[in-house]
Image (cartoon, rainbow, N blue to C red):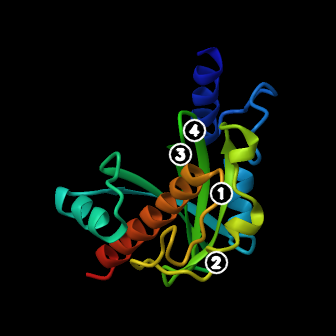
Amino acid sequence: MKFKILSKLCAIALLTGILISPVCARVYMQKEEALKQAFPAADNIDAVNLYLSEKEIEQVYHASGVRPDSALYTFYVGSKNGSVTGYAAIEAATVRTLPETVIVVLEPDGSIRYAEILAFFEPAEYKPSERWMDQFPGAVLSPQLRVGGEIHGITGATLSAHAITRQVRKSAAMLKIYLEGNNQ
């Protein structure tokens, strides 16, 4: 119970940028470092909050198969000389019983640049490898962007594979809503 509470506090700390103590040994990268890695050439990184209507929540669910936990969603937008270089979303979710945090970085056209695990509190053997994570770059949101479709499963870590894939799908669907809203 103590570890479960501690791991949730560590995940919250990662999302809010609060310094994390050494007790949170499975935090691999802080938010600021992850955003710098996502947008290495950017001269500006802005946080943009989406406030989804019920209709938009349904659109995200229909497109991704994942119902958003909240009508509020944050994207980070990297830009250089006023041109967008990409988008990033930092997603926290429960895998089995403990949280993980993933950054999903998307190209300006909505395709996936990469996804990376920032924190993982389940047992280490359930953490997907970098090789497995390398399935996402270049992918686009489609019915085939799922475990058993374009994404291979992980023997012994099925829940981790599904959780990360859901996070990637939801981020791509949210970006689609955001881009459509800005092109009206």
First in sequence, mark 3 or 2: give its number.
3
94 to the left or right of 113: left
Q: Amino acid at mark 4?
A: Pro
Q: Please tell me how crowded label 4 is: few (under 14), some (14-19), or many (20+) other residues with Cα within 10 Å.
A: many
Is the residue under label 4 in contact with that under label 3 (CB below 8 Å)?
A: yes
Calculate the distance from the C-alpha at mark 4 to the C-alpha at mark 2: 23 Å
For mark 3, what is the residue? 92
Quadrant location, the N terminus: top right
Q: Secondary structure at mark 4?
A: strand
Q: Dot 2 corresponds to which residue?
A: 137
**CA gap, disc 4 and disc 1:** 20 Å
Relative to residue 172, is residue 98 depicted above or below? above
Mark 4 vs 2: CB contact within 8 A: no
Q: Residues within 10 Å of mark 1 (few under 14, many from 20)?
A: few
Callout 3: helix, strand or loop?
Answer: strand
* Residue 119 tag number: none
Q: Point out the frontmost of discs 2 and 1.
A: 1
Type of amino acid at the residue the image marks with label 3: Ala
Residue drawn 40% across the image and 53% down it: 73
Is residue 174 something one can see in this rendering? Answer: yes
Sequence-wise first label, 1 or 3: 3
User: Which residue in the rendered view is the most extreme toward the front?
Assistant: 155
Tally the marks.
4
107 vs 46, nearest the viewer:
107
**Image coordinates for residue 88, horizontal then vertical, percent:** 56, 64
Q: Is label 2 in a helix, a strand or a loop?
A: loop
**Residue 133 found in image quarter:** bottom right
The amino acid at mark 2 is Pro
Question: Within the image, what quadrant is residue 12 found in?
Answer: top right
Left or right of residue 54: residue 176: right
Q: Kindly identify which residue carries mark 4.
A: 99
Disc 1: which residue: 155
